[in-house]
Image (cartoon, helix red, strand yellow):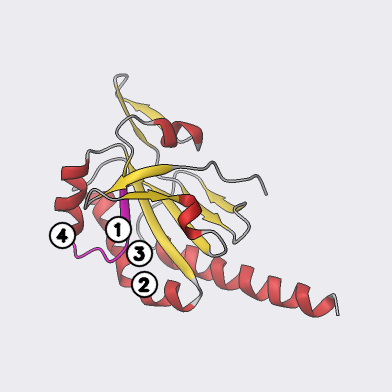
Amino acid sequence: GDTAPAFTLTDADGHQISLADYAGGKVIVYFYPAAMTPGCTTQACGFRDNVFAFNKEGAVIVGISVDDMASHKEFAEKHSLPFTILADSDKAVTRSYGVLKTYMGVMEMARRDTFIIDPQGRVAKHYESVNPEGHSQVVLADIKALKAAAAAGSKGGR
């Protein structure tokens, strides 16, 4: 229920994208450690393969890592990712979401966490340290459940 931290980051094409750009809609914000690694590829391709189902539910997908813009562009092109991936090179957004993790005692990267942001900009669900295999299906099922609960709640208020 907390308000999602606002952000403005650069996408793979050099455009500035803000969380506010998606106000009034559902946003899946998923953080991943590094492009082109097996787990991150599995996770991204899972979201890619379900993108039409997410769109049908009125949800957009945004991936964020601390990689640079060039690696994001290569990652998006190589795997035909039809959603926005953002470069958080200074790690400020990853830190503000509480998912910056130190690996091997020296490297700071994003932990594999996902957030569902509701149309009011609040965190509706937070998944911590997720398994990339099958994760998009879990998130999609929860999006559908949240939509059903919202519809039931609006009917109860009449």
Circles 3, 2 touching at the beta carbon (< 8 Å):
yes
Q: Secondary structure at mark 3?
A: helix
Q: Secondary structure at mark 4?
A: helix
In the picture, measured across the screen, residue 66 lies left or right of residue 57, that is left
Label 4 amino acid? Glu
Distance, label 1 to label 3, CA atoms, is 5 Å
Q: Secondary structure at mark 2?
A: loop
Decide which of tag 3 and tag 4 comes sooner along the chain: 3
Decide which of tag 4 and tag 1 comes sooner along the chain: 1
Residue 55 in magenta stretch: no
Residue at image x 46%, y 56%?
21
Q: Position of residue 51 (x, y in %)?
A: 36, 71
Residue at image x 83%, y 77%?
156
Q: Relative to 23, say whether 8 is above or below.
A: above
Badge 1: few (under 14), some or many (20 or more) residues near its Cα, within 10 Å?
many
Badge 4: few (under 14), some or many (20 or more) residues near its Cα, within 10 Å?
few
**Residue highlighted by disc 2:** 50
Which of the two residues, 43 or 150, is positioned nearer the viewer here? 150
Report the span colored magenta.
Answer: 77-86
Distance, label 4 to label 2, CA atoms, is 17 Å
Circles 1, 3 touching at the beta carbon (< 8 Å):
yes
In the picture, measured across the screen, residue 91 lies left or right of residue 154, that is left
Residue 77 disc label: 4
**Residue highlighted by disc 1:** 44
Q: Relative to 77, say whether 72 is above or below.
A: above
- Residue at the farthest right position: 158
**Residue highlighted by disc 3:** 47
Label 2 amino acid? Asn
Of marks 3 and 4, the one in the foreground: 4
